[in-house]
Image (cartoon, rainbow, N blue to C red):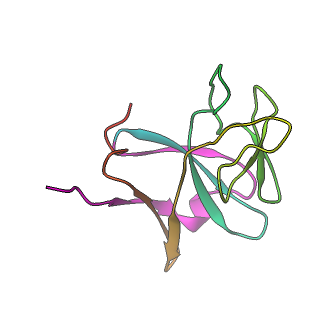
Amino acid sequence: MERSNREYTIGAVEDFMLQIGRVVHAGEVELAIFRTSDGAVYAVRNHSPHPKGGPLAEGIVSGYYLYDPLHDWKIDLRTGEVQAPDRGQAEVYPVTVEGGVVKVTLPAAVTTLN
């Protein structure tokens, strides 16, 4: 039997300050939520793709890019792709904003990660 994606309500859009990361939990998954200067909202697993790891929520946002707070890797919030010369992939998840309510969708396999 195949498990479906799971949608989580994570707050109101005004709960997320522009260009400032915020940690939220969706099930057992810790996410870093970012709202860009144009009001778009992005969800990234709060774990750096750098080999030494670390949190992403305290990173600096510029445009659609997140700068890893510990390793200064530049991560595209839209795709999770780490920009050259570094290489890696952050886990990003779809976000919807309906009526001022922010929701994130996680694949069923991800909802049980620690």
How many labels, in total? Answer: 0
Residue 90 image position (x, y, % from top left): 61, 42
Above or below residue 96? Residue 58 is above
Residue 71 picture location, percent across and down: 78, 27
Q: Residue furthest bottom?
A: 99
Which residue is situated farthest in the left direction here? Answer: 1
Q: Nearer the viewer, residue 47 or 81?
A: 81
Front residue of 7/19: it is: 7
Q: Measured from the top left, where is residue 23 in percent x and y?
A: 55, 42
Image quadrant in which the C terminus is located: top left
Would you say 85 lies left or right of 25 here?
Answer: right
The quarter of the rendered structure image containing the N terminus is bottom left
Which of the two residues, 91 or 41, is positioned nearer the viewer here?
Answer: 91
From the viewer's perspective, tell me whether residue 18 is left or right of residue 101.
right
Reply above or below: 29 against 11: above
The residue lying at 31 percent from left, 51 percent from top is 108
Residue at screen point 56% across, 38% down: 46
**Image position, residue 15 (x, y; %):** 58, 58
For the record, the magenta segment spans: 1-27
Residue occupying the point 64% across, 42% down:
89
> Is residue 83 highlighted in magenta?
no
Q: Is residue 52 above or below residue 11?
A: above
Would residue 87 appear left or right of 44 to someone viewing this image?
A: right
**19 magenta-colored:** yes
In the figure, residue 2 lies in which quadrant?
bottom left
Residue depicted at x 55% and y 45%: 91
